[in-house]
Amino acid sequence: MKTQKRYLFFLVIALSLPFAPLGCNGKSEKKSGPTGVSPKETKATEKHDDRGPFGVTHTVQEGQTLWDIARAYNVSIKQIMEANQIDAREIRRLKKGARIRIPGATRVVHVETAADRAAKRQDLPPLKDGAYHFLREGESLWTLAHLYDVSIDAILERNGLSDEDVSRMRIGQAVIIPGISEERVRQDDSKKRIGIYRRVEKGETVWDIARTFEVSVAEIMAANALSAEEIELIRDGTELFLPGVEDDGRGHVRRKASASDRRAAVAAKRLGLGTRNVAGKLLRGQVEPRWMRAAGGENRFEGTLRWPVTKGWFTRGYGSGEDGYHLAVDIMGEIGWNVRAAASGIVAYSGNELRGYGNAVLVIHKGGWVTMYAHNSVNFVKAGEKVAKGGILAELGSTGISRGPHVHFEFIYDGKNCDPAALFRPGVRHRSGKLSPIDPLVWLKPKNKPREIRCAPRRRHPRSRWVIDEDPIDSSSPEVTEP
């Protein structure tokens, strides 16, 4: 009887101990984590992995990343890290053969690898309007756009890709490049990839690197097979590949100008666009007739505006803030999402010289509308470049004086900031995905402004420390915080 009681006592104690997954040698992996297991230490395969209330055990195959695995099992990287006691420094060191516990999973699933993607090539249908390019290590859609002189918008549209899809591109994945021949792909496929390796320094973030080298965070994610969660966990000492960046031979490491960049520069010089002085004029609503003609015409507006961040959500509106000083709309989103043109037009300014706004883009639209997109992580367009409605301008960010990643959107006409809410299509979107019940309006002619649309001169914040930089070309004006 005493023996039975003693047995039950130790059984209860054993069951109360925290679970740690076991390697095939029967020893706990708690200390070393999955990265400490070499292929020689395990004979486990995906076909006979352990299953139980804590999930299943997945054996890492060649080329699989933690993100690939998390996506396949529909769990977060954080959940896998916690279940396997992996720290942030280990997530990039998964070895082939390592066994990791997938919490909550009921069966082992197949995780696609580069070899799987390569095997699918023979099943691709023939093309008449372009050719396939198979992503190599370190490439992204932006490098392909530069390589083939095709707009990123055209590549996204032809491949039916969303903002989230862009950062999920993987080695071996087929991308249709519209308007080129197969011969051109074979010719360019032999070229050495362009880019540099950069080690993250102490106190530096991926956003700092993106801003310095004019490479988007989404581009870095795609080139290094990183997820949004992994980007957040990057630590100093991590080596990253920065695609499209090269040494110009004069001591500067930067992205080389593409053919479209050079064409835009010629147009900007001809029209007198691209300077800080031009940006100051536009923020005051001073639009020259030649700029309107270049944007599409002088006498008629496009009528409506596109929501600038496809799935972005409204956080702050026109007339908000103390005494209603905030005559703009703030739209938040997630890492890697794009900021898009609210209407077609011509890029008049793309830079970071407007104090407080960080990386900003100003677009002139036909009829004299001006829109501004500020706090971007990186700008993709150049002054002088024509953009379509919905065309990609920048990546959502938090540069300048900003309280988190968002785009600060201003709608300007005739020297005043106007409330764009009723002109947005499909509407003002909230984080839940629902649209605000606002009566949609159309504004087609300059003199026929709908009375429901409020317009007012730019305002300063009531307290002197928080001001709007009303005149960015006036060096005596105080700097701004959140515009």
Image (cartoon, helix red, strand yellow):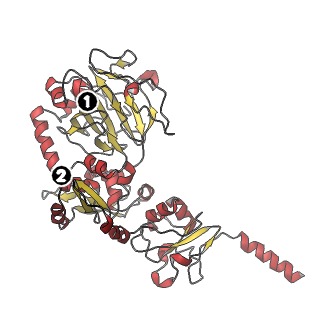
Q: Earlier in the sequence, mark 1 or mark 2?
A: 2
Indicate left or right for 127 with 462 as reference.
left
Q: Secondary structure at mark 2?
A: loop
Q: Residues within 10 Å of mark 2 (few under 14, many from 20)?
A: some
Q: Residues within 10 Å of mark 1 (few under 14, many from 20)?
A: many
The three-letter code of the residue at mark 1 reads Pro
Report the number of numbered marks: 2
Percent of width and height locating residue 164: 39, 51
Percent of width and height locating residue 280: 23, 28
Indicate left or right for 344 with 263 as reference.
right
Residue at the spot 19% in from the left edge and 52% down from the top edge: 179
- Viewer-closest of 36 and 149: 149
Residue at the spot 49% in from the left edge and 65% down from the top edge: 87
| Disc 1/disc 2 C-alpha distance (Å) | 34 Å
Pair 1/2: label in front: 2
Confirm whether residue 197 shows in the render: yes
The three-letter code of the residue at mark 2 reads Asp
Confirm whether residue 253 shows in the render: no
Q: Quadrant of residue 358?
A: top left
Percent of width and height locating residue 281: 21, 26
Q: Secondary structure at mark 1?
A: loop
Quadrant in which the N terminus is drawn: bottom right
- Viewer-closest of 250 and 220: 220
Residue 264 drawn above or below residue 112: above
Q: Residue at label 1? A: 472
Numbered tag placed on residue 185 in the rendering: none
Q: Residue at label 2? A: 149
